[in-house]
Amino acid sequence: MIEQLFELAKKKKITELEVLINHSTSFSIQAYEGKIESYKKTSTAGLGVRGTYQGGTGYAYTERLHLREFDTVLDMVKDNASLMKEKEPLLAEKQKGSWQDSQPDISEEEKINLALMLEAEARAAKEVSDVSYALVSSGEGIRQVANTYGLNKTYRSNYTMAYLSVIVKRDDEVETDSAYYLGDLNKLDRAKLIQEAVSKARRKLGGKPIPVGHYPVVLDRRVVCSLLGVYSGVFSARNVMQGTSRLEGQLGAKLFGSLDLLDDPHSGHEKVMFDDEGVDTAKMYLVRDGVVESYLHSLQTANEMGQAPTGHGIRSYKGPVQITPHRMQIPNGETALSTLFAEMGNGVYITDVQGLHSGTNTVSGDFSLAAQGFRIENGKIAAPIKEITIAHNFFDLFAHIEKKANDFDFAMPNGHSQYGAPSILFSNIAVSS
């Protein structure tokens, strides 16, 4: 099919062509009050093309993978290329390969039973007043990228996940929290998952604001991952070129104290062997010992900045190339979280933040976020706190890391990128109520 598309493109005087094909299937089941509330099973497929015609690059796509559709799709490439005089480079290398990252799966019937058991057992836990979500999901995808220079790479992967969100109530006070498990569902410990979600929600009960001031603060790993997700765009070479990143002209500058920040595409819940332009991926440091070492590049930005591509050109078959990290992470520390609290003495442990989009400025780095957590008194977790706001600047904050815990983990996947970090102690964050 691809070769026929290439032959047709040649006849239409499209000088080079790239094809991206995605096939995906997904299944999810949600239980509520002992019944199946939601049952979804979907299958999608699409073909996106990017081609060069008369010196410009055009895009087009179709979700009907039939030869009779190709003529129309290639005509759309020509029309769009005529409007865009800019030419985007393709990977001009003959590379071929096929990779697979398959995890064990269970039957649909077993997934249904698992969701029902999770919901029933969680609802029976002490102080649980309701179960918001008892969800089991799975999916499989095949991604293929090929071009007229001889590139042809395929990757197949799948995932399985259980997600639980509970509401706890004590007198008139309610709180909610969640937990998830990603991996072989045959190995899921339901009691452990339920305990995690319930205990996280329960420990929030009785929370109160604290006096306004500047406190030493431990940011939980989930909060650190959230901040990385919001500010990861500052490392995009496209944002640097457009003047919307403070890292413009800062390669080689020591901006982040002792921070190490890397992108390791072969870690996390699913390996990323190559990007959507066919460029191989590899572990790379964005920041090492505080020094900015690299930006994230697509083929186009690498070409324009005279640097090597990094394998971060990502797109769906429907759209143009974007730049995004794969598995951005701060390496693990060596100190137990409890020891981190002991070394802090008195301060604040932040476990949740809200307002990540409205309360953050990705250009200046400033943020002001609603938060919840706990007072740390004499090195121990004390009373819960809520209805507070934490404020700082992303660049300044991560230039002054005091110490990292040894509790590294990845946050729950959300789209292509995944973020990982340990909990981190900072000496001074503004807290208001």
Image: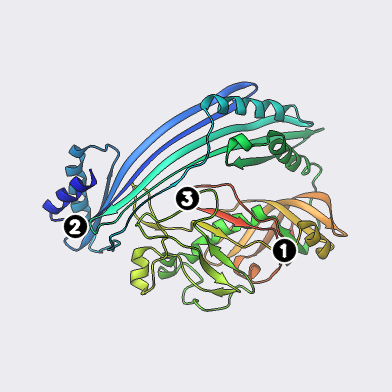
Residue at x 67%, y 58% (from the top left corner): 422
Tag 3 residue: 416
Question: Label 1 neighbourhood size at 10 Å, few (<14), some (14-19), many (20+)?
Answer: few
* Residue at 66% from the left image edge and 41% from the top image edge: 179
Query: Alpha-carbon distance for marks 3 and 2?
Result: 31 Å
Q: Quadrant of the C terminus?
A: bottom right
The tag on residue 175 is none
Q: Amino acid at mark 1?
A: Glu
- Residue 344 at x, y = what percent? 81, 64
The reply, left or right, for residue 62 in relation to residue 44 is: left
| Other residues around mark 3 within 10 Å, as few (<14) / some (14–19) / many (≥20) | few
Task: Tell me the SS state at disc 1.
Answer: loop
Tag in front: 3 or 1:
1
106 in relation to 13, above or below: above
Q: Is residue 292 left or right of residue 148?
A: right
| Residue 417 visible at all | yes
Q: Which mark sits nearer the N-terminus, 1 or 2?
A: 2
Q: Secondary structure at mark 2?
A: helix
The residues bearing labels 3 and 1 have C-alpha atoms spaced at a distance of: 29 Å
Q: Label 3 amino acid? A: His
Query: Of discs 3 and 2, which sits in the foreground?
Result: 3
Q: State the residue position of label 2.
A: 82
Q: Which three-letter amino acid code belongs to the residue tagged 2?
A: Ser
Furthest-bottom residue in this view: 253
Mark 1 or mark 2, which is nearer to you?
1
Toward which corner of the image does residue 176 lie, by quadrant?
top right
Q: Nearer the viewer, residue 107 or 5?
A: 107
